[in-house]
Amino acid sequence: LGIRPTLSVNGSVIGAYPRVAAAARDAGWEFMGHGWFQVPTHRIENQREMIARTAGEIAAFTGRPCTGWLGPGLTETPETPDLLAEAGIRWTGDFVVDDLPARIATTHGEMLALPYSVELNDIPVVMIQHHDEQELPRRARLHAARLLREAEAASGVKIMCVAIHPYITGVPHRIGALEALFADLAADPRIAFLQ
């Protein structure tokens, strides 16, 4: 469908699963830092080192700077935005904001909080709330329809994020519903996927 995903990736995954990382890199996916290991940020003794190590590994592997970040479990401390900006991170999904970016002031300049929703994430929808394979696509269609109406009314742009995990939504009994959702979204000329 010509959709270029953003891969939320622990820095350690690149060395531990090189075939997976190479497949994503070679397909042109954007790599977004997601910690070194899947450990909540507030439990990391040296955040600065972890962020720099993750961003450095991604940059070395992809040949492009790591500019985006999503903390494991959306976790941060009051210092995290400053440390992210210090490492060259320009945007984060950690602040679950609605449909427009928000500016965050840091000690190293401004960064953006980009829209990210736990309501359009297969972990809470499927694994926690125990909905079937149709619920996430149903919510995403409703979400997109509302944002399109609002964007048209205001002659503006809205941003929608759908967070999926291969071991949840990519399984055989769920992936068809996901494929149908993205085919519908891609067929709408009013919708563009971030590149």
Image (cartoon, grey):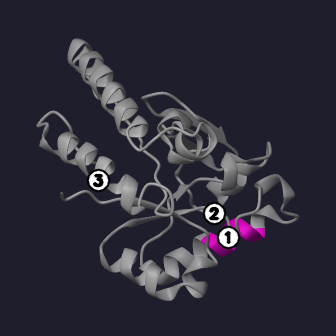
Alpha carbon of mark 2 to alpha carbon of mark 1: how far?
6 Å
Q: Which mark is residue 18?
A: none
Can I make out residue 153 in this image? yes
Name the kind of residue labelled 1 in the image: Ala
Q: Closer to the camera, 16 or 110?
A: 16
Mark 2 belongs to which amino acid?
Ala
Residue 180, percent across and down? 23, 46
Return the residue nearer the eye: 86 or 175: 175
Q: Say which of 124 and 107 sits in front.
A: 124
Residue beneath disc 3: 176
Q: Main secondary structure of the magenta part?
A: helix
Label 1 environment density (alpha carbons within 10 Å; few <14, some 14–19, many ≥20): many
The single residue placed furthest to the top in the displayed view is 153
| Number of residues whose C-alpha sits closer than 10 Å to that of mark 3, classed few (under 14), some (14–19) or many (20 or more) | some
Q: Which residues are magenta?
A: 49-54
How far across and down, in percent of the image, does residue 135 sit? 42, 35
Q: How far apart, in angstroms, are the residues tagged by discs 3 and 2?
A: 39 Å
> Which residue is under mark 2?
87
Label 2 packing within 10 angstroms: few (<14), some (14-19), many (20+): many
Q: Residue at x 73, y 48 (%)?
A: 75
**Mark 2 or mark 1: which comes first in sequence?**
1
Q: Residue at x 52, y 36 (%)?
A: 117
Q: Amino acid at mark 3?
A: Gly
Query: Whole-Å distance between the Cαs marked 3 and 1?
Result: 38 Å
Is the Cβ of the residue at disc 2 closer than 8 Å to that at disc 1? Answer: yes
Disc marking residue 52: 1
SS at circle 2: loop
- The mark that comes first in sequence, 3 or 1, is 1
